[in-house]
């Protein structure tokens, strides 16, 4: 019979594919991640590296409980705590997690060296602002403590917040804890709220908030577009940073009288096509996920002038699929949206 356990993993804002730096990490002066600036669990979902059908990684709980569970297939539920905000996030689960013996860890370590993967990890530690010296000196016997097949990984997308008072956890140590059931996730209903709310905490946080890098161009466009749209629709009919049912945020929403809502997604890549590519799926999710229909128009905004090809592409999507997707350029000189939708 498969044992079910719940495990805390170190905080990460790169979806646990590479180290993400000190933000949200433990501030306990004696903790490993505070001392060296990263945690070995930060590669837990780096599924580009597969050996014999398995992804090998490190789990602190398995490091301390290696012998206890060495012959077990575990179903492990994962969560993490952002130490900066004190928020708790349910990450997902892994079926048939196996503990890796020391000799097998040494074998995989050699493969990582030969493939150049270890050097890649060392570079990533440096890029995250931490010292890579500790990783270079890590004992090959303990670098890999667990393995699993990628098909046995099930992740929440995005991670879901739950309350610190939820009784689903018996403790928050980095070891195997008994699984007491799923926590009650904090939920949100899409509700249009007028006003410009950049960076404000409305009592609801998203995992994306913790990984978002500040983009000055994005902020300038959002500020200018908001002011521009309030002239057209009025202060009570335009809002920024609008929360969706999935815990994500819409850059700007405008309410056009009784005709419905317009969702705006701002992108700052250097070409129109790149901005369309980045924003399109987000706007679809904002309006339609999981079975909604919130917006009458979806508008991609960027500082790039529209091209004939991009305009034809969006028109083709509208005609073939009936998706109300448009593009509107933002003039960085006048600090206003151009009037024409494409």
Image (spheres, helix red, strand yellow):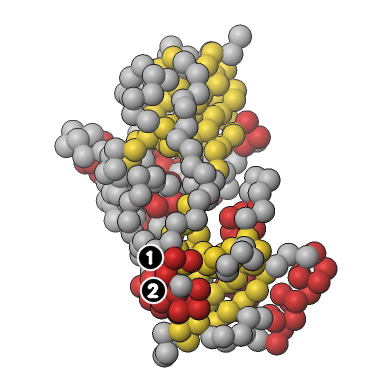
Where residue 163 sits, quadrant-wise, is: top left
Counting other residues with Cα less than 10 Å from the Cα at mark 1, is it few (<14), some (14-19), or many (20 or more)? Answer: some
- Quadrant position of residue 225: bottom left
Mark whose residue sits in front, 2 or 1: 1
Residue at 62% of width from left, 31% of height from top? 152
| Residue closer to the observer: 244 or 143 | 244
Determine the residue positioned at 61% across, 85% down.
340
Q: Position of residue 46 (x, y in %)?
A: 52, 45
Q: Which residue is mark 1?
A: 196
Q: Residue at x 54, y 29 (%)?
A: 93
> Which badge, 2 or 1, is on the more N-terminal residue?
1
Q: Secondary structure at mark 1?
A: loop
Residue at the extreme bottom: 333
Label 2 packing within 10 angstroms: few (<14), some (14-19), many (20+): some
* Vertical placement of residue 118 versus 342, above or below: above
Do the numbered discs 2 and 1 sit on residues whose CB atoms are within 8 Å?
Answer: yes
Which residue extends farthest front? 258
Nearer the observer, 219 or 241? 241
Image coordinates of residue 267 in percent, x first then y, are 51, 71
Q: Is residue 311 left or right of residue 127?
A: right
Which disc is residue 223 wearing?
Answer: 2
Q: Does dot 2 land on a helix, a strand or a loop?
A: helix
Residue 102 higher or lower than 12, as above or below: above
- In the rendered image, is residue 17 in sight? no
Q: Position of residue 23 (x, y in %)?
A: 30, 49
| Quadrant holding the N terminus | top right
At 58% from the left and 47% from the top, the residue drawn is 48
Q: Nearer the viewer, residue 341 or 170?
A: 341
Tell which of 277 and 318 is nearer to you.
318
Left or right: 6 as drawn, with respect to 54: left
């Amino acid at each position: 019979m498969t044992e079910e356990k719940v495990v805390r993993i170190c905080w990460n804002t790169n979806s646990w594919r590479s180290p993400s730096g000190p933000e949200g990490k433990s501030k306990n002066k004696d903790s490993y991640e505070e001392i060296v600036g990263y945690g070995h669990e930060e590669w837990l979902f780096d599924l580009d590296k597969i050996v014999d059908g398995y992804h090998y990684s490190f789990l602190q709980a398995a490091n301390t409980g290696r012998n206890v569970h060495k012959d077990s297939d575990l179903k492990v539920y994962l969560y993490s705590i952002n130490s900066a905000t004190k928020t708790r996030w349910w990450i997902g689960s892994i079926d048939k997690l196996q503990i890796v013996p020391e000799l097998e860890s040494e074998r995989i370590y050699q493969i990582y060296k030969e493939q150049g993967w270890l050097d890649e990890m060392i570079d990533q530690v440096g890029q995250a602002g931490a010292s890579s010296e500790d990783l270079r000196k890590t004992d090959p016997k303990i670098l890999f403590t667990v393995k699993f097949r990628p098909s046995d990984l099930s992740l929440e997308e995005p991670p879901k917040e739950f309350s610190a008072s939820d009784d689903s956890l018996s403790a928050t140590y980095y070891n195997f804890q008994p699984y007491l059931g799923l926590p009650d996730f904090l939920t949100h209903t899409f509700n249009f709220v007028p006003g410009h709310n950049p960076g404000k905490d409305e009592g609801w946080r998203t995992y994306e908030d913790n990984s978002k890098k500040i983009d000055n161009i994005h902020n300038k466009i959002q500020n200018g577009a908001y002011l521009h749209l309030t002239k057209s629709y009025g202060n009570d009919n335009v809002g920024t940073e609008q929360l969706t049912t999935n815990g994500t945020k819409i850059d700007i929403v405008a309410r056009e009288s009784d005709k419905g809502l317009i969702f705006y997604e701002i992108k700052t890549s250097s070409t129109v096509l790149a901005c369309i590519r980045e924003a399109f799926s987000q706007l679809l999710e904002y309006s339609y996920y999981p079975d909604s229909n919130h917006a009458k128009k979806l508008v991609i905004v960027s500082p790039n002038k529209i091209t004939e090809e991009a305009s034809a592409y969006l028109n083709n999507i509208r005609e073939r699929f009936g998706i109300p997707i448009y593009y509107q350029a933002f003039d960085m000189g006048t600090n206003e949206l151009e009037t024409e939708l494409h």
